[in-house]
Image (cartoon, rainbow, N blue to C red):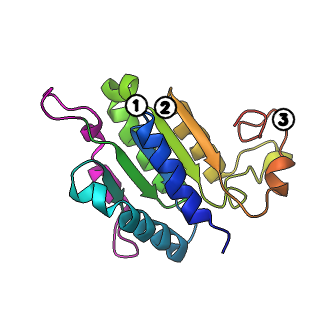
Amino acid sequence: QSGKTTSFMSVVSAALDNGYNFIIVLGGRNTPLYSQNSLEFEDNFNYAINEGRVNVFSVDLPEGHLSDIDDLPISFIEQDSPLVPPIPVISIILKHQDHIKRLKELIKGNRHLLHKINALIIDDEADSASLNSLVHDCDESAIYKEIKKLRNSLPRHSLLQYTATPQSILLTSRNDHYSPEWV
């Protein structure tokens, strides 16, 4: 165990304390890793969830459906009443092109919130599927392309990559949006 989950929780807590109100966790390519991340976030932020200070959202896999992403309470970021404070949202999604695309479409459908969103994107196992595996074919792989579009849909965001094998990320072209030079 490398302490990755502990680091996730610390970074997310610090981000919430510093004005980030939308945390997106690309929680893994497979259901077990995704489910583990979802449970960890729910357990670690249970106190804040129960007090209504944060909303943790994930699709219950494998029973859940892609359309469940449409239920993400992004509107909690902006409350109409000054008496009701905004509620930050933590969204754990499967690192799959369809899930990322659905989230991006939900964000674009709420354009009126974009000026209020300070997002943190956490990519778990950033060396797995996030990098462009088709770079030598002068093309973009599906997950890479959707992460790029997701980032482009959020005018104010930071990206944090987690991996136990950073060599692949460090060898990324300096012109790539996933290069450590830009991220």
Tell me which amino acid carries mark 3: Arg
Q: Quarter-wise, where is residue 18 in the image?
A: top left
- Secondary structure of the residue carrying tag 3 is loop
Report the mark closest to the observer, 2 or 1: 1
Residue 47 shows in the view: yes
Judge whether 9 appears above or below 18 on screen.
below
Q: Residue 18 versus residue 156: which sits nearer the camera?
A: 18
Q: Where is residue 151 in the image (x, y as percent from the top left)?
A: 56, 36
User: Number of labelled discs?
Assistant: 3
CA distance separating discs 2 and 1: 8 Å
Q: Quarter-wise, where is residue 86 in the image?
A: top left
Residue 22 belongs to the span the image colors magenta: no
The residue drawn where x is 79% and y is 56% is 166
Q: The magenta stretch spans which residues? A: 60-85
Tell me which amino acid carries mark 2: Leu
Q: Main secondary structure of the magenta part?
A: loop
Q: How crowded is mark 1: few (under 14 residues within 10 Å), some or many (20 or more)?
A: many
Q: Upstream in the sequence, badge 2 or badge 1?
A: 1
Confirm or deny contact between disc 2 and disc 1 (CB under 8 A). yes
- Secondary structure of the residue carrying tag 2 is loop
CA distance separating discs 3 and 1: 28 Å
- Name the residue beneath numbered marker 3: 174
Confirm or deny contact between disc 3 and disc 1 (CB under 8 A). no
Q: Position of residue 160 (x, y in %)?
A: 62, 46
* 163 with respect to 97 (left or right): right
Q: How crowded is mark 2: few (under 14 residues within 10 Å), some or many (20 or more)?
A: some
Confirm or deny contact between disc 3 and disc 2 (CB under 8 A). no
Q: Upstream in the sequence, badge 3 or badge 1?
A: 1
Residue 67 shows in the view: no
- Name the residue beneath numbered marker 2: 154
Q: Residue 166 versus residue 14: which sits nearer the camera?
A: 14
- Name the residue beneath numbered marker 1: 117
